[in-house]
């Protein structure tokens, strides 16, 4: 154990004020990216919109635009992971999952996260752009799928261990992933434009969750029957 | 009829050389956007990569970045529309379509277009970015769905005229659309990275087409049964 890294000197720990400033930059960046697109937003716009007078405020907290985007992605991925971990634990305690329960464990954590975020939110549109951005798509995919809860969920799959065509299994996983990401971005856009109340938004997110579970169930049994 | 607009003066018609330059800018922009993302590419990079020495070459042909992107979108949408129009005509001649034939008419025109483009291509990744870009998403959606062939296809729908929940019908259409767009971008990325031959690429596109028809059939019968 390396004492010098394990016990950081107090001066190397960011102050609460510095953490607040970092968080404000992340929230502001997410909103601007969602509304104007990655191509339409400069570091300077983010700094100014976050009320930072210091010209190098963004550079102080994030070495690059991609590091800023990755930090936002990881914060959300961690929140989604907490929801999924809780749902998987319930199925683990029972030792099995029906196909619908298994798929609900894939779909619902993201829906729960959106319900918590309330409306207007920006994360859905932000994520949809990150997953198609050439330099970020691999990272965004891994942040959401290579997680402990997904590994636990894999072991509970109704047909776990069955021999499968790898190309088809991966394609199937990709279809589910992009349905969740882009349908969420669509609903978020609608809710933001329609100025939905928090209650209306919650109902709309749960309806989308139900539709997605149903759609994915149908898609899965057609593509990977048996 | 306004004669002055219906019969343009010869001088207002672009020269073949000007049309070639315009096309070269479009092809170059598409490739750069696919490889580096909308945010990673400036008008200057496009002009230089297209071998244009004139500083205002892009501005001469396109009044804005969005106009350039829309021109690229529309060129591809027109090619996809020609494929769909041919397929719909076959079903119209018979006067009916099975659910699988109907869905094939939605899925296959885009697949055919990719087969024609060969590999490496850039259109798939370009389109995936356009449909999530806040200022372009509505335009991109309309360019591909509000077309004569889709209107003709609607009239051939196996359950045309049946009373449907509008939210669900629209959600269903959105799911299909985003499966086609983003699964195509995924395959294009793989083929470009793996340096597939033209034949390998064609087989891979047709396999994706078959998988998509199967997946969409399953999804549709689960989400909109009966």
Image (tube, coloured by chain):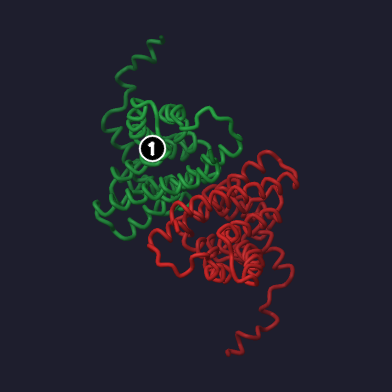
Chain colours: A green, B red
**Disc 1 sits on a residue from what chain?**
A
Element at label 1: helix
Residue A56 visible in the snapshot: no
Report x, y in % for residue A2: 41, 10
User: In this picture, is A120 found above or below B96?
Assistant: above
Which residue corresponds to mark 1?
A101
Which residue corresponds to the image point at 38% horizontal and 26% vertical from the top-left? A95
The image quarter containing residue B109 is bottom right
Q: Residue at x 26, y 33 (%)?
A: A17
Q: Say which residue appears at 50% left-offset and 61% top-offset.
A: B141
Looking at the picture, how far across and down is residue A53, in whole percent?
A: 32, 43
- Does the rendering let one see residue B17? yes
Question: Could you say which quadrant of the image residue B166 lies in?
Answer: bottom left
Q: Quadrant of the C terminus of chain B?
A: bottom left
**How many numbered dots are placed on residues in this image?**
1
A120 or B108: nearer the viewer: B108
Position of A68 relative to B222 (above/below): above
- Pointer 1 local density, CA inside 10 Å: few below 14, some 14–19, many at least 20: some
Q: Is residue B187 left or right of residue A21?
A: right
On screen, residue B116 versus residue B211, left or right, reads right
Q: Quadrant of the N terminus of chain B?
A: bottom right
Q: Is residue B31 left or right of residue A223?
A: right
Q: Position of residue B218 (x, y in %)?
A: 51, 50
Question: Which of these two is toward me, B79 or B139?
Answer: B79
Pick the residue in front: A180 or A44. A180
Picture coordinates of residue B150 (x, y %)? Answer: 55, 67
Front position in the image: B142 or A68: B142
């Amino acid at each position: 154990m390396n004492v010098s890294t394990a016990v950081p000197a107090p001066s190397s720990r960011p102050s609460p004020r510095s953490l607040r400033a970092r968080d404000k930059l992340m929230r502001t960046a997410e909103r601007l990216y969602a509304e104007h697109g990655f191509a339409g937003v400069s570091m300077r716009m983010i700094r100014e919109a976050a009320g930072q007078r210091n010209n190098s405020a963004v550079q102080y907290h994030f070495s690059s635009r991609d590091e800023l985007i990755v930090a936002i992605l990881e914060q959300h991925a961690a929140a989604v992971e907490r929801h999924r971990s809780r749902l998987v634990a319930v199925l683990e305690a029972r030792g099995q999952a029906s196909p619908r329960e298994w798929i609900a464990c894939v779909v619902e954590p993201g829906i729960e996260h959106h319900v918590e975020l309330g409306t207007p939110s920006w994360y859905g549109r932000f994520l949809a752009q990150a997953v198609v951005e050439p330099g970020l798509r691999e990272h965004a995919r891994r942040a959401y799928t290579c997680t402990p809860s997904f590994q636990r969920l894999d072991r509970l799959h109704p047909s776990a261990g069955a021999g499968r065509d790898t190309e088809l299994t991966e394609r199937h996983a990709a279809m589910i992933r992009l349905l969740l990401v882009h349908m969420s971005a669509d609903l978020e856009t609608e809710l933001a434009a329609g100025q939905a109340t928090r209650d209306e938004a919650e109902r709309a997110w749960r309806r989308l969750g139900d539709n997605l579970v149903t759609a994915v169930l149908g898609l899965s049994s057609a593509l990977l029957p048996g």
